Amino acid sequence: MFTRCLRSAAVVALTCLTLTATQACTTAPGGPKARNTTQAPSVPPSAIKLRAGPVTDVSASCTGSSAEVEEASAPPGYVYAEWIGCGGIGFARSTDSGRHFDAAMTVPGSNGFSWDPAVTVAADGTVYAAFMHTSRGASGSSMYPVVAVSRDHGATFAQVHQDLPPAPGNWGDRDFIAAGPRNQLFLTWDYGPSAAEIKTLCVKTGSCSFTRGDFNVVIQASSNGGVTWGPITHLQPGFPLGGGYGAPLVVGPDGSVDVLCVAHPTDSLTGKVNPGYEYFTSSEDGTHWPAAPRRLWPGKGTLSVPEWWIDGDISADAAGNLYVTWDTQTAAGDIGWLTYSEDGGRAWSAPLRVTPDSGNAPHIVESAGGQAGIAYIAWQTSAPAQGYATYLRPFSIRRGWLGPAIKVSAAYGNAKIWPGDTFGISPLPDGSISLTWGSAAGTSKRSAIYATVVKSYFPHLQAKISASPKA
């Protein structure tokens, strides 16, 4: 969400909890058209052991703090990390599947006030590094997405394209970008016609949330690599008081687009927002959308107004099965959840609890799809008494949890220093998982971006786990 500056967040302890997956599903009347997905393989319930490799400080060459990382990967072994830092938006690439990273650079066009990075890779290897930016002109300030383009696998960014709002004076926030077939790009961001209507609520150990304003999740499409963008399409009814922000998305090989977003009911007279929910919507082509998104599992609790992190993530496995993660704030504490769909979002499994602790610490829950029917669920939390930590756990649609969670962050992070509203996770071609996260590790007084690669092999494939011990 909107970031005033690089700041901190609070942390707490975590234990393993084994839960059995629930197969009950709910179907949305009038929802998206069901899609065919590959049948998930039957995976033996025997525990799978994960092991994280050495931890690398990706942002070591940058001065100052670095936080809020996003990442993407591409064959044969590229990993791209993008974050807030390096005097604007930082970027680093790995050419050996996340084991080593080149020196960090500042993304062109991000000097000044830039925030909320997002990154994707097209089928031809083109890297698109997006971020939010604000500038002031003769008619007032504007907040809008910017997309930097690299055609040499992230070595340089030769083009920078601004996606300007319809008129100055607007509010803009959290962008997400995804590449599709036929040179298509899809960009979601949070848009409001008037920044003057926005009221923020900021905390010392986090970033900012919003108490009132004209919030709307919008999507735009580009067919020329981000040079120009199509019209703004609102994904929620009630514009300009749709109450929406934070909309991660995935694009299928057929060009279908699936979006998860947050929406807070908004008072039409005062603009005041109330506790919200996660919503899902889908389009066959990314340009024609349902009149309203579908609310997911409201019975599991609401998303509180003071919540400052990006709550909600969506991913797809090799077969096209969808996985949605989020966390709710309830009287029982802050709880992370997982639900999945095997038919393109028409029906969703009953939510499975992800996080085992019962406190009120934030849980940023994300996922990466693996082989058919398999996903890797990760969360960063301020639950351990020692400080921030990031965890990973494998999941199967057919068998539920495939093993215990492991802590992938070698050192705990200072609970008083903001690590960012997101972290990065992506699958690699060899079946391993790349993770990146922000943390003020050990005695550090500033947050940095760290990376590791987690290896896992399934026992029924008679493969051997191989990974170097943690640093």
Image (cartoon, rainbow, N blue to C red):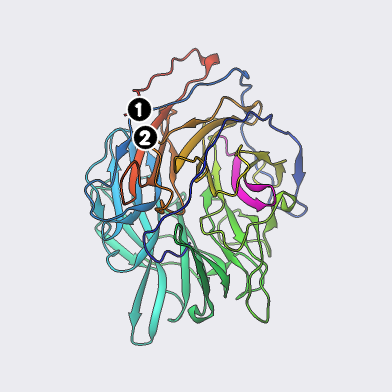
Residue 148 horizontal side relative to residue 456, left or right: left
**Which numbered dot is residue 470?**
1
Determine the CA span between mark 1 and mark 2.
9 Å
Badge 1: how crowded within 10 Å, few (<14), some, or many (20+)? few
Q: Position of residue 369 (x, y in %)?
A: 52, 37
Count of numbered tags: 2
Q: Which residues are magenta?
A: 319-334
Magenta stretch prevailing secondary structure: strand
Residue that lies at the very extreme toward the top in this rendered image: 462
Q: Which element is circle 1 on? A: loop
Residue at the image point whose x is 39% and y is 58% from the top: 7
Cβ atoms under marks 1 and 2 closer than 8 Å? yes
Label whose residue precedes the other's in the sequence (1 or 2): 2
Confirm whether the magenta stretch covers residue 36. Answer: no
Q: Which element is circle 2 on? A: strand
> In this picture, is 280 found above or below 227?
above
Amino acid at pointer 1? Lys
**Which numbered dot is residue 452?**
2
Q: Is 203 or 175 nearer to us in this picture?
A: 203
Q: Position of residue 441 (x, y in %)?
A: 35, 42
Q: Position of residue 45 (x, y in %)?
A: 63, 19
Residue 56 horizontal side relative to residue 262, left or right: left
